[in-house]
Structures are given as structure tokens and as C-alpha cells.
Amino acid sequence: MKTKPASDRALDAAVYGLLLLAASACLFPFLNVLSKSLSANWAVTSGRVGLWPVGFNLENLFYVVTDRIFLHALGISVLVTAAGTLGAVLFTAVSAYPLSKKHLPGVKFVLIMYVFTMLFNGGMIPSYLLIKQLGMMNHLSSLVLPGLINVFNMLLVKNYFESLPESLEESAKLDGASNLTIVLRIIVPISAPVFATVSLFYAVAFWSDWFHPMLYLSDPSLKPLQLYLRDIVLESDTSGQNLDLNIDQLMNISPEGIRNATVIVSTVPILLVYPFLQRYFIRGILVGSVKG
């Protein structure tokens, strides 16, 4: 049995060590937040909570998931994420497919224009003025429409389309299939990996976006979850006097525990999406990024 040279084993150990360090840097803060959300009031306020809950209780989580404002903000975020992701995948696919056909006239010029917008854009103030002129202030469309196409994701899908064998379309045309039939019945079904990949990218981007809601929304009834979370973290009263708590809850609930529970509850929905798309993720991003 052939063994690896000492230099290769040392390199493997260094790589695994760096990966373990990076994973720990991401995982430990999350575990600390989770532990605080599951710990008793006295343990959180005295700073005794590390990576494991102290004085385990679920009062913080129960308070958050039964809060009417939180549930309303959660519904807004789910609506924006679902509508934005579906629309973005549709617009990205419609834009990428023609650009994958190099025989079409003007494809190279249009592609350069897309890449130009990826490298240079108008910035925050022109975008704000545009949204205002279009009458989209205080409307959820201002959170969805500007993000319908991400050029990086569009290039990923374009490269995936280019990697598909041309014989698939040629044989379908010989059988009398139209271009629309080829796209809907051949291209779309076999492109599930790259669609799942960009869906995850778009879903995370729409779900995590708090900057655009802060710019375009001033109506409290339209606040998505990220703005609600920002208000909880930055603006809540640390003494807890603004919290609607009874005597029993005051024994087990702390403002810091509620903030940590809010972070956990707002993170779980987008984490649940990943396992359903994981089996497509590696294949989609590899095939889409290699060719082109």
C-alpha cells in the first residue's frame, strides 16, 4: 500500500486545521446565541452562558414565536423571499438562455453590457431616486424588482446551458419540436441543479436583506423580519421595561435572551431550505462555473 510523502501529510494536516478553525469561527458564535436563547434569565444576565445552555428553559423562544409583530414580520419576509426567488430564477433563466447561443447576433455585445453593470453601477443615491420616481416607496415591490437579476448568477446559468450537448436540441428539432417545446420539456428539466443552486443564492439574499427595506420602507406594517431583528438588537430597552411580561415570565425571560431567541428563530427558516437543495448544489455550481 502506497503511503503519502511526509510533505503531503503535513499539507493535509494544515488544510484540515485551517478548515476546522474557519468552521469553529462560524459555529461558536451561533452556539453561544443558541445557548443564551435556551438559558434561564439569571444565567444570561450574569454572563455564565458559553456554548451550552445554563438553566435550560424555552420561555424566550415561546415568547418570540407567539409575538404578533414578530409573526407579521416573518410573514413579510417569507412573502418577499418566495416572490423574489421565483421571479429572479425566471428572469435569470430567460436572460441566460439566449446568451448561451453564440450564433445569435449581438450576443457578445449584450453580454458585455451585463458584465459592465456587474462591475459598475449607479450606487445607492441613484437607485433610491429611481425607486422614488417609480412610486415604489413603501411598497414591497421595491424589495423584489431591483433584485430580479444578479449578473453573477446569470453567468452561472448561462455557462450551465452552454455545457449541455447541442445534440439534445438538434434531435428534438428533427422530431419536429418547437423552440418553446425544447426549452420547457428538455432544457428546464435537466437544468434542475443550476436552478436549485441559484435559487439558494437568491433566497439567502432576499431573506437576509435589511439595507433596502431600511431605505425604501417607512411604514411599520411592511417591516420584514430583518428590520424587526435590527430594531430588537439595536433599539430595544435593555432593562426590559417595554416587554409585556407577567410575573412568572419575569423569572425566566430576559431582554438579551429574547434578542438571541429572535436571532435563532429568524435563522431557522432559511437553514431549512438548504437540505432540500444540497444534493443539487455541488453539481450545479461546478458545471455552471467551469465552462464559458
Image (cartoon, rainbow, N blue to C red):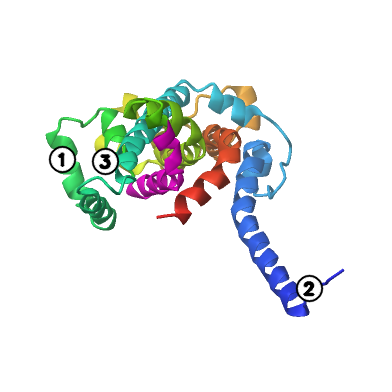
User: In percent of the image, x 37 and y 31: which residue is there?
Assistant: 173
User: In percent of the image, x 67 and y 40: which residue is there?
Assistant: 42
Q: Compared with residue 189, is residue 290 higher up or lower down, i.e. above or below?
A: below
Marks 1 and 3 close (CB-CB < 8 Å) = no
> Marks 1 and 3, Cα distance to the nearest angstrom?
12 Å
Q: Is residue 251 left or right of residue 92?
A: right
> Which label's residue is closer to the chain start, 1 or 2?
2
The residue to which callout 2 is attached is: 4
The residue to which callout 3 is attached is: 215
Residue 218 in view of the camera: no
- Point out which mark residue 130 bears: 1
Residue 151, given in percent of the width and then of the height, sits at 33, 48
Q: Which residues are magenta?
A: 151-171
Residue 97, given in percent of the width and then of the height, sits at 34, 40
> Marks 1 and 2, Cα distance to the nearest angstrom?
60 Å
Secondary structure category for the residue under label 1: helix
Residue 152 within the magenta-colored segment of the rendering: yes
Question: Predominant secondary structure in magenta?
Answer: helix
**In this view, the mark in front (1 or 3):** 1
Which quadrant would the N terminus be assigned to in this image?
Answer: bottom right
Secondary structure category for the residue under label 2: loop
> Which three-letter amino acid code belongs to the residue tagged 3?
Leu
Marks 2 and 3 close (CB-CB < 8 Å) = no
